[in-house]
Amino acid sequence: MGFLDRAKKLAGQAKDAADQAKKLAEQATSKASDALSDASSRMAQSSGTTSAPPTAPGGGASGAPEYGTPYVPGMLGRPGWRERGLTDPAALLPIRERDHAGVPHTTKSKIIEEPFGMGRRWTSAGRSAALFYQLYPEHKAWEPPGGRAPFSGVAGASVATLNDGRTLVFLGAGGQSVVLELTGIDDPVRADLARTVAERLGAS
């Protein structure tokens, strides 16, 4: 075999080796990406939800998929929780706890305002769970027609039942008050949800 033939053969072998190395590198990158994606998914599932990233008032929609319906600043006609830099209601009433209460994790929220606050409500098959911030004076001044009663299990909390069957649990921490609204939820689960909201509200 002449020198030129040997050189061509070595060049071909070098090219094959380079192609193989490139292929191995691409496989390694793909596996690393899959592992990272899987780890992120498991972390999201184990924690139930995550807090929304900080955004300046008046910014774009809150698009975290675990929150369901995106919140758009001003969509309620006046500033809501996001413009005030507060934790999203979906983070105070996490997806895992809602699922445990019988409101499936696939249920999308509705962003609404009630006389007692602004927030999100998840409704499915006769059950609902909702969390409202009492942001304005009229929210805080509103009182249920039948009055309130002490709510056992959470210090300082009170509870009321509306004529349509909704139960309202009034909670507060650090000067910020919220209303947990539940329909078709048993008392023990209701107490667990209230404690979860109170703990997260205090930590936010």
Image: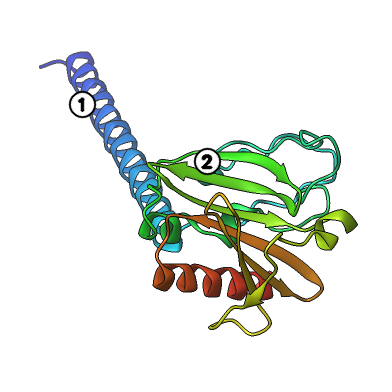
| Amino acid tagged 1 | Gln
Find residue 65 and name its label. 2
Instruction: Name which quarter of the figure residue 46 lies in.
Output: bottom left
Q: Where is residue 139 in the image (x, y as percent from the top left)?
A: 81, 56
Q: Where is residue 113 in the image (x, y as percent from the top left)?
A: 72, 43
Label 2: few (<14), some (14–19) or many (≥20) C-alpha neighbours in 10 Å: few
Find residue 124 and name its label. none
Decide if residue 6 is on the left or right side of residue 176.
left
x 58%, y 68%: residue: 197
Return the residue at label 1. 13
In this view, the residue in front, 14 or 160, is 160
Mark count: 2
Q: Earlier along the polypeptide chain: callout 2 or callout 1? A: 1
SS for callout 2? helix
x 40%, y 73%: residue: 188
- Badges 2 and 1: C-beta atoms under 8 Å apart? no
SS for callout 1? helix
Q: Which residue lies furthest to the left in this view?
A: 1
Decide if residue 69 is on the left or right side of residue 36.
right
The colour scheme of the drawn protein is: rainbow
In this view, the residue in front, 16 or 96, is 96
Decide if residue 59 is on the left or right side of residue 26.
right
Instruction: Name which quarter of the figure residue 33 lies in.
Output: top left
Report if residue 50 is visible in the image: no
**Cα separation between marks 2 and 1:** 49 Å
